[in-house]
């Protein structure tokens, strides 16, 4: 009897059938989700344009775009992590800490590019820690990232002494206020990041392994995929994007606060799950996340314009997340029955 050998990690398609099956499932499944989200988005636009005379203003759409950026940038990394079978609750804390670090370094005289690079390195470091603990130590990623959420947020308060760091650097602030051809710079950054990472998913080993690890980590490992090392990549990417989102927060607000982006993980996860990414891993698409993000941004903006109180907006976000998870479970259940 001849033994069946897994494909070597250096081969052209290490996870072979595993990745191809995961990609086919993700694509077919998410077409329905995308169409549903586009329909919901259209209904929102029609409803809020009737309810408020200001909704269709160009300035308001610019505000919606800006509002999408912070959550959207972090949602890119969260999508990758969840597709790969993980979870990252630390993104809000990483945003705050990275923004605080960048603001402090700029105020201390470091050049803006180096300050931003240092912030991203911080985010990558937290991500690598999450990936190492969840992967090599096999601690539940929910517990792992909940712990780093508390640690990083606490360190942000300790380092800053609980005080805000006001930014005076014109270049830093320009990121949050300037536009290119009428499009806010932060929106350009968001779109470029979505396109860049989105192009990697179906065409590269990175994308194939993301789906393979999330679909069946054991099968991927038997096929030669270094699962734990790739988890470092996934979480490191999530941390770096959360750090970029934190720097964008500072650029938009003009100051860094240790309490900034508190609760942002709820918005990020809601956008990702609403976009059709499965909490069980192996299924998801960045286009769906972008649509989920747009649905939430338009909803938040519309509620503000019609005068809904902020605490009711939080209630609505929670309901949307619950409905998104319930819908995902219903879809999964119907597929299992078939």
Image (tube, rainbow, N blue to C red):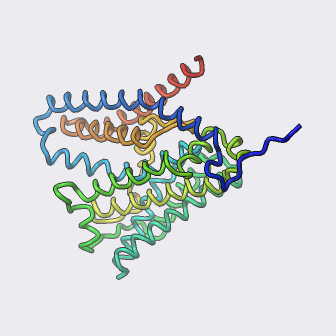
Whether residue 65 sits left or right of residue 3 in the image: it is left
Q: Which residue is situated farthest in the front direction here?
A: 2
Residue at 26 percent of width and 67 percent of height = 173
44 relative to 9, above or below: above
187 relative to 254, above or below: above
Q: Which residue is situated farthest in the right direction here?
A: 1
Q: Residue 118: horizontal and vertical position, in percent?
A: 45, 72
Q: Residue 181: horizontal and vertical position, in percent?
A: 17, 57
Residue at 25 percent of width and 30 percent of height = 42
Q: Residue 29: horizontal and vertical position, in percent?
A: 48, 29
Residue at 24 percent of width and 40 percent of height = 301
Of residues 8 and 148, the one nearer the viewer is 8
302 relative to 188, above or below: above
Q: Residue 101: horizontal and vertical position, in percent?
A: 42, 70
Of residues 61 and 4, the one nearer the viewer is 4
Whether residue 51 sits left or right of residue 125 in the image: it is left
Q: Which residue is situated farthest in the bottom direction here?
A: 109
């Amino acid at each position: 009897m001849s033994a069946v050998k897994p494909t070597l990690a250096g081969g052209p398609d290490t996870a072979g059938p595993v990745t191809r099956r995961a990609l086919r499932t993700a694509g077919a499944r998410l077409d329905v989700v995308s169409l549903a989200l586009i329909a919901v988005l259209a209904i929102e636009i029609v409803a809020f344009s009737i309810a408020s005379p200001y909704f269709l203003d160009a300035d308001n759409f610019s505000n919606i775009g800006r509002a999408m950026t912070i959550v959207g940038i972090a949602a890119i990394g969260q999508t990758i992590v969840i597709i790969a079978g993980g979870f990252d609750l630390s993104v809000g804390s990483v945003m705050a800490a990275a923004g605080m670090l960048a603001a402090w370094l700029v105020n201390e005289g470091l050049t803006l590019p180096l300050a931003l690079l240092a912030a991203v390195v911080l985010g990558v470091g937290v991500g690598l820690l999450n990936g190492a603990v969840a992967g090599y130590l096999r601690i539940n990623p929910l517990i792992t990232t909940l712990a780093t959420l508390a640690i990083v947020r606490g360190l942000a308060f300790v380092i800053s002494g609980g005080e805000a760091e006001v930014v005076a650097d014109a270049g830093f602030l320009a990121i949050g206020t300037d536009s290119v051809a009428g499009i806010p710079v932060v929106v350009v950054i968001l779109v470029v990041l979505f396109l860049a990472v989105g192009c990697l998913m179906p065409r590269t080993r990175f994308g194939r392994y993301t789906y393979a690890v999330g679909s069946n980590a054991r099968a991927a490992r038997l096929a030669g995929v270094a699962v734990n090392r790739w988890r470092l990549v996934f979480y490191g990417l999530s941390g770096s994007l959360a750090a970029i989102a934190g720097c964008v927060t500072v650029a938009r607000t003009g100051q860094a606060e240790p309490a900034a982006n508190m609760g942002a993980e709820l918005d990020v996860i809601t956008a990702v799950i609403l976009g059709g990414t499965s909490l069980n891993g192996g299924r998801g698409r960045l286009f769906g996340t972008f649509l989920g993000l747009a649905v939430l941004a338009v909803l938040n903006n519309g509620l503000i314009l019609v005068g809904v109180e902020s605490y009711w907006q939080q209630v609505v976000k929670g309901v949307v997340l619950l409905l998104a998870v319930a819908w995902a479970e219903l879809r999964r259940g119907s597929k299992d029955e078939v």
